[in-house]
Image (cartoon, helix red, strand yellow):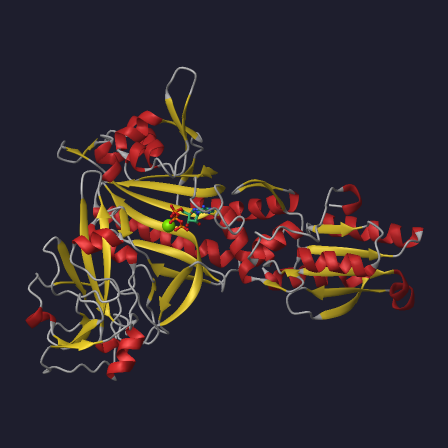
Amino acid sequence: MRLSKASWQTYKEIPKEAEIPSHQLLLKAGMIHKSGSGIYQYLPFALRVIQKIEKIVREEMNAIYSQEITMSMVTPGELWKESGRWDLMENLMVQFHDRGGKDLCLSPTNEESVTDIFRRMTKSYKQLPVSFYQINTKFRDEIRPRFGLMRGREFIMKDAYTFHADRDSLNIGYDEMYQAYSNIFTRMGLEFAIVEADAGNMGTSESKTHEFQVIAETGEDDIVYTDGNYAANIEKAATTRVGLEFSKDQEMSEVETPNMKTIKDVCEFLGSKQYQSLKSLVYTAVWPDREEHYLVMLLGDDELNELKLKNYIGCNFLLMTKEETMRDLGLVKGFIGPTNCSENLKVIYDKAIDLDSSYIVGANKADMHLKGFMPSKNCNSEKIQVDLRSAQVGDLAPNGEKVKIKKGIEVGHIFQLGDKYTKAMKAQVLNKEGKKISPLMGCYGIGVTRTMAAAIEQNHDELGMIWPMPIAPYQVYFAMIGKSEETKNLGLDIYKELIAEGIEVLFDDRGLGPGQMFKDADLLGLPIRLTLGERDYKEDGKLEIKLRKSGESQKVSTNDLVSTIKSKIKELL
Ligand code: ATP
Ligand code: MG
């Protein structure tokens, strides 16, 4: 593309809401415009990145014999009512009706549609396995759209779905996808981690699920990993604490702790370590017809992982319990503990707690704590123990190694769904014995537009983006400095030659000064910058090649230009 013939506008001023580099840089470089909250226009350079990502995705999906389809973006409400998700997803899904009063929605995902396609086509186990994918627009009415393309409301997703006769076949299909996803993100030139994810209440205990996380400081997810082969999303990671010393044989007694409302204050006052106390948190699980109250006990310096609690309880809505309800349950704010409280409160202990050791805990009396509280001895309620804490640096992973934590961006997610949708939507096939079975499903997503943003989060500096070669909008930024006809003709000839050689060139023939041109080149971050400077060329007959990432530069004559650029591209692909 010749910039003199293109529409490209960069921006100095961008809105404050753009907090993270990818959002800022995509706006500054004029690659996207905001159209509404969480809704963006993809301008020419962004579209080229999207198309490159999609090409890699298509090639890897086709290679495992997944067939591409396009499902309608607007789907009838009936399908969602069949699966039972019409009401469940009410908040995430934009629902509306047509002039005839029929319910419709904008697809946030497509399990229902694909199951409908499947059931109309497939009658026998002999036709299995089946694998479809699409690259399509999704709409999710996210509570808090943010970070530009990272968490949009309208975004592009690749979603694939497979159907299998049995679990073995599902596992094979899953492993193929896992490998295809690894290939995809490797080919894009991104540093990523594959982590065990949380199956939530979607899956069964057998359901495998993994996330593909691009490593970046600005990621919203915490990845718990070891130098060996363990990696899990913090939502899922079940690690063990080490180096704890508990005392065993204290007698329980009340101590006055006036105005000491934090664990830190109380432990300092009593000369104990924070983990030798218990933290008490009160939560209410809300169902359409009832509420249940839980007292969650954790070691004093541990944090609750709310998702683990939700999964244990099996509810979608969990709230911190209101103060008046707490009072009804016999709890005294600031001094909450598991003694003297209502029977309507279920007590759950985190697994890190040794039920036969003594702890400091709130006494449920104003300004009072208990010392020497031993759950097995001093608490009447049932002793339920569940892993509820968030993993911390230094814990031990299931493989026995110490864990570390880093930030990641979830760009892909693969998931074994089982027969949830095929059962609900009566998508049955006949097995070998002629019996009707509900096939097992897997679903596999990649956020295409989120991947573009994640690539920038991982690859940028203070001057702009630094595109990995495989997904860069163009491979070469060709800056031409000079106004003479001779230079212009030479520049155009070189441009044409590079294009003819199959090199993707963005030719900056706008006639700007070098300062502005280089600034734009750095901002856009194409991997290779080629400069034809009139003055230098007159002196030595050479052009300059500079790599955006390493800053490394060299001079080349026109004769060596094509071969040098080609070998640089090859190195960076
Ligand atoms: P998250 O946990 O980030 O909300 P999710 O687990 O709900 O995502 P999935 O249903 O697994 O997302 O969707 C598959 C992929 O689609 C995700 O891995 C992510 O890359 C992408 N994606 C999901 N939500 C968004 C969004 N709001 N904006 C952009 N991409 C998204
Ligand atoms: Mg996910």
Is the residue 15 above or below the residue 545 in the image?
above
Is the residue 513 above or below the residue 201 in the image?
below
Query: Where residue 173 appears, x then y in whole percent?
Result: 31, 48
Query: Where residue 461 appears, x then y in whole percent?
Result: 62, 65
Residue lying at the far top of the rendered structure: 100
**Along the viewing direction, whichever of 113 and 238 lies nearer the viewer:** 238
Q: Quadrant of the C terminus?
A: bottom right
Query: Where residue 36 appears, x then y in whole percent?
Result: 56, 39
- The residue located at (26%, 33%) in the rendering is 84
**Along the viewing direction, whichever of 350 and 558 lies nearer the viewer:** 350
Q: Is residue 54 left or right of residue 342?
A: right
Res 534 seen here: yes
Q: Is residue 55 left or right of residue 232?
A: right
- The residue located at (16%, 55%) in the rendering is 329
Q: Quadrant of the N terminus?
A: top right
Query: Where residue 474 appears, x then y in whole percent?
Result: 66, 51
Q: Is residue 437 left or right of residue 94?
A: left
- The residue located at (66%, 52%) in the rendering is 28
Res 395 seen here: no
